[in-house]
Image (cartoon, rainbow, N blue to C red):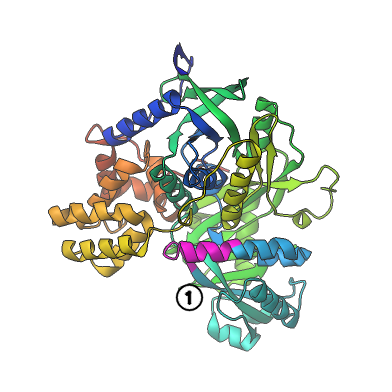
Amino acid sequence: MGTESTTETAPEPGPSASLHATAARGQSLEQLTTQDHDVLIVGGGINGAISALALANHGLRVALIDSEDFASGVSQESSNLIWGGFKYLQTYDVALVAGLCRSRNLLARAYSSRVQEVRFLAALGSTSPYSPAYAALGAHAYWALGRFATGRPRLLSSRSLATAEPTIDSGDVQGAVEYSDYLLADNDARFVLQLLLDAVDSGAVAVSRVRLDGAERAGDGWRAEVIDRLTGDRHAVEAAVLVNAAGPRATELAALTGTTLRQALCYSKGAHIVVPQVTESGRVLAFFDDDQRLFYVIPMGHRSLIGTTDTRVEEAEASITHDDRDFLLEQANARLRLPQPLLHDDVIAYRCGVRALVVDESEDTDRDWTELSRRHAVEADRQRATISILGGKLSDCLNVGQEVVAAARKCGLAPGVPDRAWYGEPPAGVRDRFHRSAVRAGVDEPAAARLWRRHGRRALEVADLVEETPELGQPLSDLVECSAAEVMVMARHEHILSMDDFLRRRTMLAMLETAETLSRDPGVERAESLLFGPGPERPVSAANESGRGAA
């Protein structure tokens, strides 16, 4: 085990990483390449992060790599919903919905500051396949499947709807159903990162920008060859079991390791657009589009997120098209009462990802696309010492974590029994200690709540910095609500190697503002200086890698 002398001929140009990030990454890379690991996880999205958290808290030695930044694949392209899958009742997949509701309820209790209940308002008009009364019956069934953990559903007449949510054009609406689900208070990528940081706190090793280039059996385990994409250096990593958490690319990784998957993957492209705020009510608005498929208008900071599409694609990568944006704008304009229609110029940013859907070899994938199940599967191959995670979603991540621990046991590992829940926010005592520190530092209550939500126990470090130097506690600008103290703590812990990492995944800034606005903002410039040090002016990316308008 150890570093090899060869280098990749054309390594990815490295970003100007901060001294903190460079030093921390170097230490993690050394641990990755010089220590023995029970498990090597390939993929740092939601499946990889939750697997690392579960396995590390069950006493296993865990390493995780991602060829890009953490959560930079489909885990940064979701609707930000933590939900029980109400729309899957359309296909009568009651077992899936019940399981998603259980996981949703656990997440909402365990991460109460990060996962927040929100009201959904579904307007039912001529494109709805269901009458308001039938939809209300479904909403009550959904409420029951969720063990009555949320607010009670209610049926609204078209007249009541016009009063409750005047933004909805009620002219074609026969009625509406209001019910509750959950929404991430910050963005999906940040939620994934927080899970991964908790895994690191529990002993896991995680390194981004490291690509798996090959793997061969070594005794009863694996010897993986990885490439540091920032330097081109090749390293060897040894682990007893290899976990495939590559998301839509899981079949490619399975082929590389010689693992035969018992189930197959199909791909669905989901696209969203971000526009100026449509409603100040805080509700998620739901509609049936012209194809009788659900789409949503979702709160996202001071903006609105519209989507998603559900388009079958053949490849694991896809980008938003003009047709996607035209469709979303068309559907929204037809159902909303706005001062003026939404236009292409109103689109601030977009999100586009490919979902991996699990299908049995015998399953007919040519039937109605939306009827394919959104379940996940965890396959353990004891002979090959591999665990493959297929499908999966934010809402179902705790079930995935539990199943991966069971799969590790099937592969011959011996996970222990944690002395407390392996997931969740820090204990109440830590939270109380932070709030006392925040009061001493003069941090107001809304800012303290945001710091706790975004950083957990690391919020104590922010409060300590502000108590020592109060001016570090001020927002960097009207646009950037992070303080200098917060960015300094992020630089220490959050593996930020580029401004894309900061703007797109550690914060929501790239989803809330255009690249032009970000490039002119003094708070963004100050954050860049805090993260990467003073130096010549660097271009500031909008961090939406596919780029606004690049359809």
- Looking at the picture, how far across and down is residue 323, in whole percent? 66, 50
Q: Is residue 169 visible in the rendered structure shown here?
A: no
Looking at the image, residue 393 sits to the left or right of residue 88; the answer is: left
Q: Is residue 395 visible in the rendered structure shown here?
A: yes
Q: Nearer the viewer, residue 133 or 262?
A: 262
| Rendered residue at 49%/22% (across/down) | 227
- Looking at the picture, how far across and down is residue 259, in whole percent? 70, 30
Magenta segment: 103-116
Relative to 12, does residue 76 appear above or below in the rendering?
A: below
The count of marks equals 1
Answer whether residue 110 is magenta in the image.
yes
| Rendered residue at 42%/56% (across/down) | 512
In the picture of the structure, the residue carrying the numbered disc 1 is 281
| Rendered residue at 36%/43% (across/down) | 494
| Rendered residue at 23%/51% (across/down) | 485
Looking at the image, residue 507 sits to the left or right of residue 145; the answer is: left
Relative to 235, does residue 540 appear above or below in the rendering?
A: below
